Image (cartoon, coloured by chain):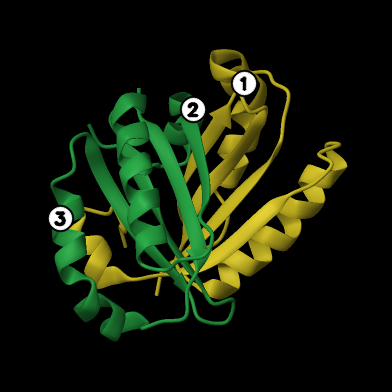
Chain colours: A yellow, B green
Amino acid sequence: MAVLLQVDFPYSGPWGEDMAQAMRGLAESIAQEPGLLWKIWTENRDASEAGGIYLFADRASAEAYLQMHRARLLGFGVPQVNVKLFDVNPALSAIDRAPLGG
Amino acid sequence: MAVLLQVDFPYSGPWGEDMAQAMRGLAESIAQEPGLLWKIWTENRDASEAGGIYLFADRASAEAYLQMHRARLLGFGVPQVNVKLFDVNPALSAIDRAPLGG
């Protein structure tokens, strides 16, 4: 069953198109991660935060990615990484047009 | 531009199919909310948390929903609601197969 990973952290830019240019290679590498269905890249200039919402095919893939990605973010100098893993409720999500893919 | 709303809160069940049965009417009403593209329903039995990841067509819709939904959750007896609003980075999300719809 699909597992949702919610990640956010303090971030001071670049934003928008500059962020996209700076992190294009990272996004391309994330697209190859085992078990990843998709990632939405998130950013909030006003709150100085960024992050991602990921859908993985299973919990093992999500946990393996999370361990690697948390270490990578700390290596980038991110001071703190907020993380939550959730199961998806497929029946309720289907009523609300959720894109669970698979 | 699409806006992502991330909500989670302490929750002690019902879970899974029982949750789907109990909240079907709520999910159907959420499907009608102005500006909602989709919602993924999330749950974590081990952490006793639940929540949702929403994609809205614009910030005004997301903020209006959030104000209503936070009050509704508090009315349900939820003691605390964790909320973050983010812009979506469309270029990076597209590389990672994100379902931004629209």
Relative to A71, A27 lies left or right: left
Image quadrant occupied by the C terminus of chain A: bottom left
Asked whether residue A31 appears in the rendered view, the answer is no
Q: Which mark is residue B89?
A: 2
Q: Residue at x 54, y 18 (%)?
A: A16
Say which chain tag 1 marks: A
Up the image or down, A75 lies above or below A59; here it is: above
Q: Residue at x 30, y 57 (%)?
A: A101
Give the alpha-carbon distance from disc 2 to disc 1, as whole Å: 8 Å
Q: Quadrant of residue B25?
A: bottom left
Q: Earlier in the sequence, mark 3 or mark 2?
A: 3
Q: Residue at x 65, y 60 (%)?
A: A65
- Using the image as rendered, state which of residue B21 and residue A40 is in the foreground: B21
Give the alpha-carbon distance from disc 1 to disc 3, as whole Å: 36 Å
Up the image or down, B64 lies above or below B30; here it is: above
Looking at the picture, which amino acid does disc 2 mark? Asn
For disc 1, the marked residue is A19
Residue A99 x/y as whole percent:
29, 53
Foreground: disc 3 or disc 2: 3
Residue A20 x/y as whole percent:
57, 22
Q: Residue at x 23, y 78 (%)?
A: B22
Residue A70 x/y as whole percent:
75, 53
Image quadrant occupied by the N terminus of chain A: bottom left
Q: Quadrant of residue A90?
A: bottom left
Task: Check disc 3: other Cα within 10 Å, few if <14, some if 14-19, many if 20+.
Answer: few
- Using the image as rendered, state which of residue A77 and residue B59 is in the foreground: B59
Q: Which mark is residue B29?
A: 3
Foreground: disc 1 or disc 3: 3
Residue B68 x/y as whole percent:
31, 45
